[in-house]
Image (spheres, rainbow, N blue to C red):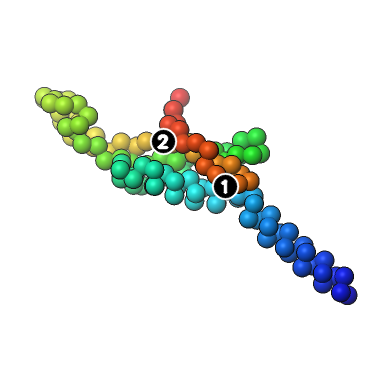
């Protein structure tokens, strides 16, 4: 009886400790979003989307996020004339893609890189 209670307490402690040290996919996504918002705050990221998640080598979460960045057409092309100015004015939202690599066991963000399409 006492052994059973002690064993259950030990088992619960191990479960809690395991949950703290091994990051699940939802925690990885939340951390990736938090880091993106913090590091790219000057770009005013909005409409953040989860694009994909991968468990690489069973040690790292690779979370790909995209977000909209407000673009000022005057900054992007200088003084533009005619159709180019109209196209630049219509395309004021640019979606950017970032890959966030997170160590699964420690929860440390190891890198944030531009995700290249294609």
Quadrant that contains the N terminus: bottom right
Front position among marks 2 and 1? 1
Q: Which quadrant of the view contains residue 91? A: top left
Q: Which residue position is annotated with label 2?
A: 97
Left or right position of 25 against 32: right
Identified at 77% across, 68% down, the residue is 9
Q: Are marks 2 and 1 in contact (CB under 8 Å)?
A: no
Query: In the image, residue 114 lies at what x, y percent?
Result: 43, 31
Element class at badge 2:
strand
Q: Is residue 9 visible?
A: yes
Query: In the image, residue 13 lies at what x, y percent?
Result: 72, 63
State the mark number for residue 107: 1
Identified at 55% across, 52% down, the residue is 27
For marks 2 and 1 on the same chain, the one whose residue lies earlier in the sequence: 2
Identified at 64% across, 50% down, the residue is 22
Left or right position of 57 against 84: right
Identified at 65% across, 56% down, the residue is 19
Query: In the image, residue 110 lies at what x, y percent?
Result: 53, 38
**Distance from the alpha carbon under mark 2 to that under mark 1:** 21 Å
């Amino acid at each position: 009886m006492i052994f059973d209670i002690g064993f259950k307490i030990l088992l619960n402690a191990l479960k809690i400790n395991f949950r703290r040290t091994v990051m699940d996919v939802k925690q990885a996504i939340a951390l990736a979003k938090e880091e993106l918002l913090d590091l790219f705050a000057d770009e005013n990221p909005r409409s953040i989307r989860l694009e994909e998640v991968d468990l690489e080598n069973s040690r790292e979460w690779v979370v790909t996020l995209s977000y909209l960045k407000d673009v000022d057409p005057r900054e992007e092309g200088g003084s533009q004339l005619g159709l180019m100015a109209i196209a630049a004015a219509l395309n004021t939202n640019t979606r950017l893609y970032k890959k966030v690599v997170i160590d699964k066991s420690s929860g440390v963000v190891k890198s944030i890189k531009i995700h290249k399409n294609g």
